[in-house]
C-alpha cells in the first residue's frame, strides 16, 4: 500500500508510517513518487516512541537510574558489599576539619585534577564518611518512596475502580472515605503515623502508602465512570463476564496511562514527604539514616561546613526532579492530544 | 445558590467531625504519654505520674476521653461559655496557647496562599499565551524545579542567603555597576517576554526597559535611597496614573473613553488625596487596622460612584475599573507611609531588618507602622518558602487549563467575530480557564498548611506548628486536637470559598 505523506513530525494519524522504507518508484527529473510501507505499531510501541522523543524525560530517566545505581552499588545493600571502601557506621577522627576531598577543578584552575580522595563528601561530626552516609540515606529514601508509590497505587486503583464501576452505595461510602483522608493535610496525618511507625523503613513506607492514595482514587474513578458506558463493557457483560473480570481485563488496561503517570508523580511526592517527616524527626529515626535526617542534623552547621547540608539536599532534588520529568514525559507519551511543551 | 452553600457546608462539617475522631484515636495511640517521666528520678515521681493521668484523663477509656474533649470543644462554639480544649503537658490552657499561636500562623498561611494563587495564575496565563516561547520554557522548567524542592532545605537556604546576606548588604546599601547592568539585562528580557509582539516591538521594549532599569538603580544607589526610602508625591501621582491606564487597557481597552475617564478621575483623586492622607495615616491616633479597613470601604464606594458618573455606556465596567484603580493607588500611598517608617524601624532593630527567627521581634515597642513593618518583614522568608511550591503547581495548572480553553470552539468564534485578542482572552477565555483552578485551590490549602508546619519549625515561630509537634512528641491529644481544630476549620472555610468561586465561575453548578 503506498501513501504519499509529508515528511513531518509526530502527527498521530501518520503514526505507523516509517519513511525509512521509502523507495523511489517512478521518476522524472522534477517529480519523484516515493512508496512508503505502512507498518502498524502497537499502542505500546507508539507510547514508547513518543516517550523516547521527550528529551526531558530521557534526561530524567538517565539521572534517576544513575542515582539509584550509585546509591545502591556504592555501599552495597542487604549484605551485598559495594565498591566504596568506607562504611557509614565507623566513626573516626576528622581529617582536615572534615572537609571534602573531592576535587573537580583541573590543575590550571587551582585544583588537583579530578580526584576523589578518601572522603569526597567530607566527614560528619563524629568522623563518619559523609559519602557513605549520604548513599545510605539515599537508599532509604528511594526505597521508601518506591514502596509508598506502589502501595498507594494499588490501593488507589482498587478504591477508584470499585467506586467508579459499582456506583451506588459502594461509591458513596468510598468517596466519603476519600474526602476524609483528603481533608486532613498530608503532613499532619503522616506525622502522627510516623511517630507510631517510624524507625523501621518498611513499616513507615507501608503506612505512608495508606494515606497518599486519594488523588489516584479520584482520577481512576473518573476514568471508570466514563469507560463503563462503552460498548465493549456491554458486550463483555452480555458474554457473561463477571464484574471483576470486566474491571481488570477490559477497563483497567485502558486507564493504564493515567495510573502510570499518577504512580510516577506520587513517587516524587513521596520522597519529599518522607524527607520532610525525617527532618521533623518523625520519620526514619536514628540509628538508621535518611536524607531528611541528615539535613536536620547539620542545618546549623550550614555556614561553616556547607557540604554537610548541600549533598543530601542535592540528592533529594535529583531524585524528585528526574522522577517529575519522567512523569511528564509519560503523560505526554500516553496522551498526545494534550498540548505539550516540546522539551 | 444558598442551598448549594448550605449543602456543601453540612457535608464538610460532617467530614470534619469524623476526622476529629480519627485524629484523636491516632494521636492517643501514637506514643507513650508518660515517656519523659519514665526516666525521672525525682522523689515526687508518683505524684507527677498522677498529675499527668489527671491532666489527660488517662484512667478513662479512649472513647470517654474523646467525649470529654468533644464536650469541651463544643463549649467553644457557643459564645459566652468558656472554651475548654484541655491543657498542654506543661499545664497551660490550650485555648490560650491557640489564640497566641493562631494569629501568626493564620497570617502566614493566608498571605502565602493568596500570593501563590495570584502570582501562579498570572504567570501561568501569560505562559499559556506565549506558548513555546523562551519565557514559556523558562517558566515550565522553573515550575518543575520548584515542585521538586524540599521545603525545609529551601527554608534553610533562604535563611542564609536572603536574610543574612541581605542584612549585610543593607549595612552599606549600594548597587555596583556590574550588578546594575545584570539586573537591567534581566529586566529587559522579562519585559520583552511579557509584552510580546513582533521582534521590532520586543527590541524596543527591551531597550527601554534596560535603560530605565539601569537609570533607576544607579539613581537609587547614588541618593542612598535604601537607607531612607520613600515614594515621593511625584512617584505616587505617576504611579496612580500608570495604574489607571494599565487597568483600563487590561479590562476594557483604551478606546472605551468612559472607563478611561473614570479611572483617570480616581487617579486624580488619589494624587490629590495623598497630601492630607499621609499625615492622617502617620498620626498615632488614627493608625489602626480599623482605619485602613474603613478607608478601603470608602475607596470602593467612591470608585463605584465615580464609575457610575463617568462611565457613560460602560457603567458596570467603569465602576469595577475605578474600584481597582482606587484600591491599588491607595496601596501605593500606604506603601509610601510604610517605607518612610523604615529608618526608625531599622534603628530599633539595629540594622538587621530581615529577621530569621520568630514571627515578630520579642518585646517590640513601636508605633503601628513599625509593628506592621516588623510583622511584614518576619513574614517575607517563610511566605517565600511556602509559596514557591504552591506557585509552581498553580502556574502549571493554570497554563494547562488556559491552553485547553484557548483551543475551544467559542474562542475561535470570538476571534472570528472580530474581537480584539485582549477581549477574547480577558473577557471570555480567562474566566472559563479558572474553573478547574478552584478545585485545585481547595486541595492545595492543605499543602500550604503542611508547608507552614515545616517552615515554622525552621524559622522558630511559636505558632501552631510548634503546638502540633510538641503535642505529638508528648502524646498530648489536647494540643494536637486544638491545632487540628483550627486547621480543619480554616480548610473548611477555604473549601467553601473555593466552592463558591466555582459556582460563581461556572453557572452550570449553580443551576443544577
Image (cartoon, grey):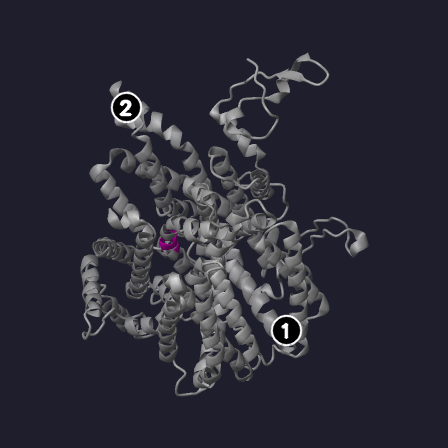
Residue A234, numbered label: 2
Give above or below for B293 relative to B454: below
Secondary-structure class at tag 1? helix
Which is nearer the eye, A57 or B90? A57
Which is nearer the eye, B45 or B401? B401
Q: Main secondary structure of the magenta part?
A: helix
Q: Residue drawn 77% across and 55% down?
A: A111
Is residue B443 a member of the stretch shown in magenta? yes
Whether labels 2 and 1 share one chain? no
Q: Residue drawn 79% across and 55% down?
A: A109
Which is nearer the eye, B361 or B377? B377
Q: Quadrant of residue A82?
A: top right
- Identify the residue position indicated by label 1 in the image: B169
Foreground label between 2 and 1: 2
- Pinpoint residue B358: horizontal percent, then vertical percent: 46, 73
- Pinpoint residue B299: horizontal percent, then vertical percent: 39, 74
Residue B69, numbered label: none
Give above or below for B274 relative to B388: below
Question: Is B362 positioned to the left or the right of B137 in the image?
Answer: left
The boundaries of the magenta stretch are B440-444
Amino acid at each position: 500500500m503506498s501513501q504519499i505523506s509529508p515528511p513531518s513530525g509526530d502527527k498521530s494519524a501518520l503514526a505507523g508510517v516509517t519513511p525509512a522504507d521509502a523507495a523511489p518508484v517512478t521518476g522524472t527529473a522534477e517529480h519523484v513518487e516515493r512508496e512508503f510501507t505502512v507498518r502498524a505499531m502497537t499502542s505500546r510501541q507508539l507510547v514508547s516512541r513518543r516517550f523516547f522523543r521527550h528529551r526531558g524525560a530521557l534526561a530524567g530517566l538517565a539521572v534517576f537510574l544513575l542515582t539509584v545505581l550509585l546509591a545502591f552499588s556504592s555501599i552495597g545493600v542487604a549484605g551485598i558489599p559495594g565498591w566504596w571502601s568506607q562504611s557509614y557506621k565507623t566513626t573516626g577522627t576528622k581529617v582536615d576539619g572534615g572537609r571534602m576531598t573531592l576535587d573537580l577543578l583541573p590543575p590550571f584552575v587551582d585544583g588537583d585534577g579530578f580526584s576523589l580522595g578518601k572522603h569526597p563528601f567530607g566527614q560528619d561530626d563524629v568522623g563518619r564518611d559523609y559519602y557513605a552516609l549520604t548513599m545510605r540515606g539515599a537508599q532509604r529514601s528511594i526505597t521508601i518512596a518506591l514502596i509508598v508509590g506502589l502501595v498507594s497505587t494499588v490501593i488507589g486503583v482498587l478504591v477508584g475502580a470499585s467506586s467508579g464501576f459499582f456506583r451506588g452505595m459502594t461509591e458513596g461510602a468510598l468517596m466519603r472515605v476519600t474526602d476524609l483522608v483528603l481533608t486532613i493535610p498530608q503532613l499532619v496525618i503522616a506525622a502522627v503515623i510516623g511517630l507510631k511507625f517510624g524507625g523501621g523503613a518498611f513499616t513507615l513506607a507501608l503506612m505512608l502508602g495508606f494515606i497518599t492514595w486519594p488523588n489516584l482514587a479520584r482520577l481512576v474513578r473518573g476514568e471508570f465512570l466514563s469507560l463503563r458506558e462503552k460498548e465493549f463493557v456491554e458486550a463483555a457483560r452480555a458474554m457473561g463476564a463477571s464484574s471483576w473480570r470486566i474491571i481488570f481485563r477490559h477497563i483497567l488496561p485502558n486507564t493504564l496511562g493515567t495510573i502510570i503517570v499518577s504512580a510516577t508523580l506520587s513517587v516524587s511526592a513521596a520522597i519529599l514527604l518522607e524527607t520532610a517527616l525525617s527532618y521533623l524527626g518523625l520519620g526514619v529515626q536514628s540509628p538508621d539514616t535518611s536524607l531528611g535526617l541528615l539535613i536536620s542534623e547539620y542545618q546549623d552547621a550550614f555556614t561553616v561546613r556547607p557540604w554537610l547540608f548541600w549533598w543530601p539536599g542535592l540528592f533529594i532534588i535529583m531524585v524528585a526532579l528526574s522522577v517529575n520529568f519522567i512523569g511528564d514525559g509519560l503523560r505526554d507519551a500516553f496522551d498526545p492530544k494534550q498540548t505539550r511543551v516540546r522539551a | 445558590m444558598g442551598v448549594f452553600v448550605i449543602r456543601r457546608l453540612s457535608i464538610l462539617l460532617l467530614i470534619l467531625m469524623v476526622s476529629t475522631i480519627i485524629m484523636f484515636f491516632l494521636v492517643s495511640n501514637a506514643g507513650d504519654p508518660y515517656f519523659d517521666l519514665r526516666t525521672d528520678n525525682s522523689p515526687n515521681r508518683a505524684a507527677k505520674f498522677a498529675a499527668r493521668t489527671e491532666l489527660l484523663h488517662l484512667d478513662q477509656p479512649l472513647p470517654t476521653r474523646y467525649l470529654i474533649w468533644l464536650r469541651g470543644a463544643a463549649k467553644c462554639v457557643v459564645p459566652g461559655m468558656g472554651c475548654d480544649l484541655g491543657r498542654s503537658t506543661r499545664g497551660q490552657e490550650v485555648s490560650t496557647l491557640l489564640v497566641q499561636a493562631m494569629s501568626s500562623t493564620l497570617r502566614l498561611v493566608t498571605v502565602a496562599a493568596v500570593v501563590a494563587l495570584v502570582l501562579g495564575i498570572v504567570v501561568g496565563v501569560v505562559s499559556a499565551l506565549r506558548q513555546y516561547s523562551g519565557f514559556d520554557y523558562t517558566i515550565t522548567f522553573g515550575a518543575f524545579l520548584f515542585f521538586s524542592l524540599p521545603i525545609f532545605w529551601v527554608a534553610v537556604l533562604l535563611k542564609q542567603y536572603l536574610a543574612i546576606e541581605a542584612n549585610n548588604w543593607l549595612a552599606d546599601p549600594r548597587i555596583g555597576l556590574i550588578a546594575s547592568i545584570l539586573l537591567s539585562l534581566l529586566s529587559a528580557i522579562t519585559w520583552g517576554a511579557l509584552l510580546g509582539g513582533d521582534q521590532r516591538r520586543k527590541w524596543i521594549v527591551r531597550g527601554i526597559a534596560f535603560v530605565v532599569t539601569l537609570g533607576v538603580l544607579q539613581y537609587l544607589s547614588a541618593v542612598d535611597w535604601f537607607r531612607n526610602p520613600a515614594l515621593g508625591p511625584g512617584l505616587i501621582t505617576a504611579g496612580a496614573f500608570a495604574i489607571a491606564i494599565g487597568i483600563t487597557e487590561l479590562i476594557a481597552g483604551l478606546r472605551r473613553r468612559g472607563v478611561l475617564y473614570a479611572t483617570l478621575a480616581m487617579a486624580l483623586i488619589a494624587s490629590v488625596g495623598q497630601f492630607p492622607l499621609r499625615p492622617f495615616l502617620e498620626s498615632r491616633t488614627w493608625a489602626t487596622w480599623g482605619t485602613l479597613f474603613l478607608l478601603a470601604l470608602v475607596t470602593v464606594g467612591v470608585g463605584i460612584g465615580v464609575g457610575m458618573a463617568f462611565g457613560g455606556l460602560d457603567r458596570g465596567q467603569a465602576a469595577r475599573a475605578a474600584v481597582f484603580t482606587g484600591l491599588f493607588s491607595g496601596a501605593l500611598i500606604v506603601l509610601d507611609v510604610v517605607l518612610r517608617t523604615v529608618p526608625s524601624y531599622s534603628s530599633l532593630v539595629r540594622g538587621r531588618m530581615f529577621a530569621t527567627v520568630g514571627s515578630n521581634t520579642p518585646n517590640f515597642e513601636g508605633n503601628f507602622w513599625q509593628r506592621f513593618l516588623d510583622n511584614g518583614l518576619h513574614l517575607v522568608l517563610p511566605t517565600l518558602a511556602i509559596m514557591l511550591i504552591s506557585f509552581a503547581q498553580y502556574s502549571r495548572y493554570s497554563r494547562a487549563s488556559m491552553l485547553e480553553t484557548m483551543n475551544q470552539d467559542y474562542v475561535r468564534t470570538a476571534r472570528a467575530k472580530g474581537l480584539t485578542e485582549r477581549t477574547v482572552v480577558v473577557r471570555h477565555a480567562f474566566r472559563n480557564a479558572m474553573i478547574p483552578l478552584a478545585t485545585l485551590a481547595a486541595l492545595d490549602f492543605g499543602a500550604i498548611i503542611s508547608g507552614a508546619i515545616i517552615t515554622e519549625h525552621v524559622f522558630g515561630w511559636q505558632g501552631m506548628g510548634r503546638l502540633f509537634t510538641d503535642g505529638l512528641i508528648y502524646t498530648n491529644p489536647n494540643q494536637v486536637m486544638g491545632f487540628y481544630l483550627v486547621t480543619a476549620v480554616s480548610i473548611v472555610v477555604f473549601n467553601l470559598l473555593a466552592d463558591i468561586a466555582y459556582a460563581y465561575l461556572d453557572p452550570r453548578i449553580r443551576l443544577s
